[in-house]
């Protein structure tokens, strides 16, 4: 899952604190509404020096996170401050998230709907698609369609009416046809590549 960021995240370490290598952190606040993964720093309540940086990997209970230490591991005491932070690892994950594209695998139907808010689109044809439609299209969207033939092949595919410049997909069994599109207005998709077939 993508790195989560929360504005002004703050709480304190609860009784039981965090012990080096324990794998969990007890907090005085609630874990409700917070989804892993994200990064936090624990600061000594007196000196305000960072004690340990933690990667929150899950939620164990309403007041406990599953965590791993980032870098040097150290124990923390009840009352120490917990704050959301950006670490080297977090920034690296954010960069990866920015370039990683989600793929929406659409179940076969003779009349499938492709939800573009879910990322690039993939479908495996086990029969003919007689019509198709789009949802979730926004201005500036770039989307790749990946259309697979099953082992029988020979299936036809009718593109959504809002798609322009689309290729005729390949029909060879167990191959893939791929083409990329862009929308200037959130209503129409235009081909920005000639596409490849029977790959």
Image (cartoon, rainbow, N blue to C red):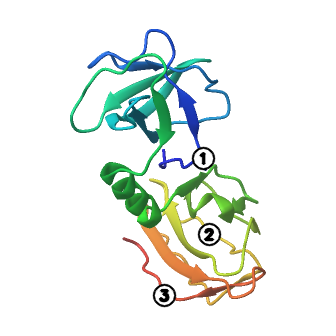
Q: Residue furthest left?
A: 72
Q: CA distance from mark 3 to mark 1?
A: 43 Å
Q: Earlier in the sequence, mark 3 or mark 2?
A: 2
124 is higher (above) or lower (below) than 156: above
Can residue 84 be seen in the rendering of this structure?
A: yes
Give residue 167's position: percent from left, percent from top: 56, 84
Q: Which residue is mark 3?
A: 193
Q: CA distance from mark 1 to mark 2?
A: 53 Å
Q: Which residue is mark 1?
A: 8
Q: Earlier in the sequence, mark 1 or mark 2?
A: 1
Assign a secondary structure to mark 2. Answer: loop
The reply, left or right, for residue 145 in relation to residue 49 is: right
The reply, left or right, for residue 44 in relation to residue 185 is: left
Marks 3 & 2, CB-CB < 8 Å contact: no
Q: For the point 43% across and 77% down, which residue is it?
A: 197
Q: For the point 23% across and 38% down, which residue is it?
A: 71
Closer to us: mark 1 or mark 2?
1
Q: Which residue is mark 2?
A: 156
Per the rendering, the mark at residue 34 is: none
Can residue 128 be seen in the rendering of this structure?
A: no
Give residue 39's position: percent from left, percent from top: 43, 41
Number of residues whose C-alpha sits closer than 10 Å to that of mark 1, classed few (under 14), some (14–19) or many (20 or more): few
45 is higher (above) or lower (below) than 125: above
Assign a secondary structure to mark 1. Answer: loop
Q: CA distance from mark 3 to mark 2?
A: 20 Å
Give residue 68's position: percent from left, percent from top: 33, 29
Closer to us: mark 3 or mark 1?
1
Q: Residue furthest top?
A: 16
Residue 175 occupies quadrant: bottom left
């Amino acid at each position: 899952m993508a790195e989560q960021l929360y504005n002004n995240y703050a709480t304190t370490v609860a009784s039981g604190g965090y012990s080096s290598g324990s794998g969990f952190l007890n907090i005085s606040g609630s874990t409700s509404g917070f989804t892993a993964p994200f990064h936090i720093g624990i600061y000594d309540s007196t000196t305000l020096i960072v004690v340990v940086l933690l990667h929150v990997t899950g939620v164990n209970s309403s007041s406990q996170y599953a965590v791993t230490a980032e870098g040097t591991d150290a124990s923390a005491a009840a009352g120490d401050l917990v704050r959301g932070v950006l670490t080297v690892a977090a920034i690296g994950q954010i960069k990866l998230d920015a370039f990683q594209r989600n793929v929406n695998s659409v179940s076969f139907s003779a009349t499938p709907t492709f939800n573009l808010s879910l990322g690039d689109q993939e479908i495996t044809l086990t029969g003919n698609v007689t019509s198709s439609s789009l949802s979730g299209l926004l201005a500036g969207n770039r989307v790749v369609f990946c259309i697979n033939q099953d082992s029988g092949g020979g299936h036809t595919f009718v593109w959504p009416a809002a798609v322009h410049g689309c290729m005729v997909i390949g029909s060879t069994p167990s191959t893939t046809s791929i083409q990329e599109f862009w929308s200037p207005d959130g209503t129409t998709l235009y081909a920005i590549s000639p596409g490849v077939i029977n790959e």
